Image (spheres, rainbow, N blue to C red):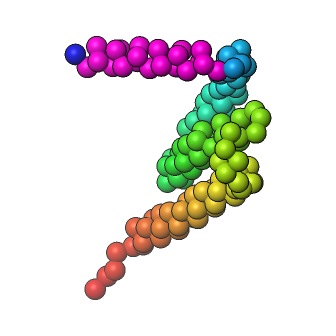
Amino acid sequence: MLRTVTAVVGVCLIGVGAFLLAGVRDPLGVLLWLGGALVLHDAVLAPLVLAAGMALAALPRRGGAARGVVRGVLVTGGALVVVTLPLLLRPGAPPNPSALPLPYGRNLLVVLAAVAAAGAGLAVVRAVRQRRRSSTNTRPPAVH
């Protein structure tokens, strides 16, 4: 039942997309834009994510705390880019001048740097905690 409902909703959304595409002045430009996004994803983004995952898997087990932080930073940064990039790369002027009143390209870089800095700080805190735990566990038991 859930599959059927999902399929019907998907087909309806495809219909809405086709209807909206028919009302666009330059449907070929929109299709080229969508095709470019697909190629960019498959040729650039997917291999980068795969390489990052392989690099994380190659970290030694002691770097396990850092793995989670790096994954969190990558997921957060990726979500920010996915939400922001289409607005930044949109061809032409925005239909509403107040839609992009600030330098969002620079601001995206600032936010990504803040996410990376927060992730680095968290990784340092976790590494210090892990070192403290391992140093307290390796002390010989006290003799009374």
Residue lying at the far left in this picture: please name it: 1
Residue shown at the point (76%, 39%) measured from the top left: 93
Is-magenta flag for residue 18? yes
- Viewed as shown, does residue 7 lie left or right of 120? left
- Measured from the top left, where is residue 5 in percent x and y? 29, 18
- Quarter assignment of residue 38: top right
- Magenta segment: 2-24
Residue 2, placed above or below residue 81: above
- Quarter assignment of residue 25: top right
Residue shown at the point (43%, 67%) measured from the top left: 133
Is-magenta flag for residue 11? yes
How many marks the image carries: the answer is 0
| Figure quadrant of the N terminus | top left
- Viewed as shown, does residue 76 lie left or right of 117? left
Query: Could one spot residue 68 in this view of the protein?
Result: yes
| Figure quadrant of the C terminus | bottom left
- Measured from the top left, where is residue 87 in percent x and y? 66, 40
- Measured from the top left, where is residue 108 in percent x and y? 68, 52
Nearest the camera: 76 or 31? 31
Query: Could one spot residue 135 in this view of the protein?
Result: no
Residue 133, placed above or below residue 91: below
Nearest the camera: 90 or 42? 90
Nearest the camera: 52 or 96? 96
The prevailing secondary structure element of the residues shown in magenta is helix
Residue 1, placed above or below residue 58: above
Residue shown at the point (60%, 38%) measured from the top left: 82
- Measured from the top left, where is residue 131 in percent x and y? 51, 66
